[in-house]
Amino acid sequence: MEMAFTPSPELYPFESRWFESSVGRVHYVDEGEGRPIVFSHGQPTWSFLYRKIILGLRDRFRCVAVDLPGFGFSVRPEGYGYTPKEHAVVLGELVDHLGLNDMIVMGQDWGGPIVLSVAASRSDRVSGVVLGNTWFWPGDLQFGIFGTLMSTGFMQRRIVEKNFFVETMMPRLARLPDEVMDHYRGVQATVEARRGLGEFPRQLTRSSSWLTDLSKAVAEQLGSKPALFVWGMKDFGFRAKRFVPRMRATFPDHVLVELPEAQHFIQEDAPDEIVAAIIDRFE
């Protein structure tokens, strides 16, 4: 399906690029030159989430940010399950298509496990990891309760029919001006466009086996890589004390940068701090 929405050239001043993946046409941006950084988004966002970080880094790094299938301007394929495992396959296809080496990978929310899956299976081509307000192991009881609630018929209808994650959750987790919110609404403006939004919360429990395998692969294949953790300290769903210890244990060579005023969408709340931390850690 074609998106009727056109992003603001002031807010999103990037050339749209397209890749014919195994499931259909995928949208991404590829800005700058140098060591590549692959940015992976989660729910309910798209490459727009990374716009300020790309602007801050593209004079030093090659910045690649994809819209996963079902998000942004990418395809909503028939028969696609919108699982993190499937998303990782598509993102991996793009990384291989672009021939990226010596790459840094960055993920937040579901973008973390998705990009780490890609990186773990290509560890010889990865030179750094950036993680913020994310995870890569089977969820705990709190995740299970949230996933079960969001999987009910009532909440699935609210997610798909009422755009619950964009209209209700995002305003609670970030203070965004109307013109920015319009960019999150615009690419998920119809029920048909939101098919992928309902699946991510269900995958908190349904992807437990995949996450179990991923946690082992990350430790074995990526644990020795230099890592940077940029953590929104006001994110009540991803409290640092609950998630950061396991991050530290998995990546001994790490730097933690606390973002004291940031909530869940750290790229919106603290882009300048994230840019500075990436430059300091990896340039």
Image (cartoon, rainbow, N blue to C red):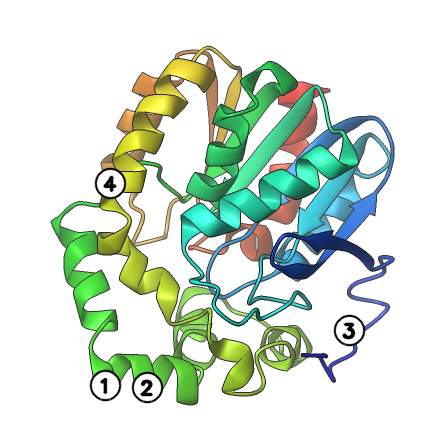
Res 115 visible: yes
* 175 and 26: which is toward the camera: 26
Tell me the residue that label 2 is attached to. 157
User: Considering only order in the chain, which callout, 2 or 3, is on the residue closer to the N terminus?
Assistant: 3
Give the quadrant of residue 113.
Answer: top left
Name the disc covering residue 7, or none.
3
Q: Where is residue 239 in the image (x, y as percent from the top left)?
A: 29, 45
Left-right relation of 91 to 151: right
Query: Can you identify the residue that label 4 sits on?
Result: 209
Q: Where is residue 215 in the image (x, y as percent from the top left)?
A: 32, 29
Kind of residue at badge 1: Phe
Is 170 on the left-hand or right-hand side of 180? left
Name the residue carrying label 1: 154
Instruction: Work out whether residue 240 can be spotted.
Output: no
Q: What element carries label 4?
A: helix
Task: Give me the C-alpha separation between circle 4 and circle 2.
Answer: 27 Å
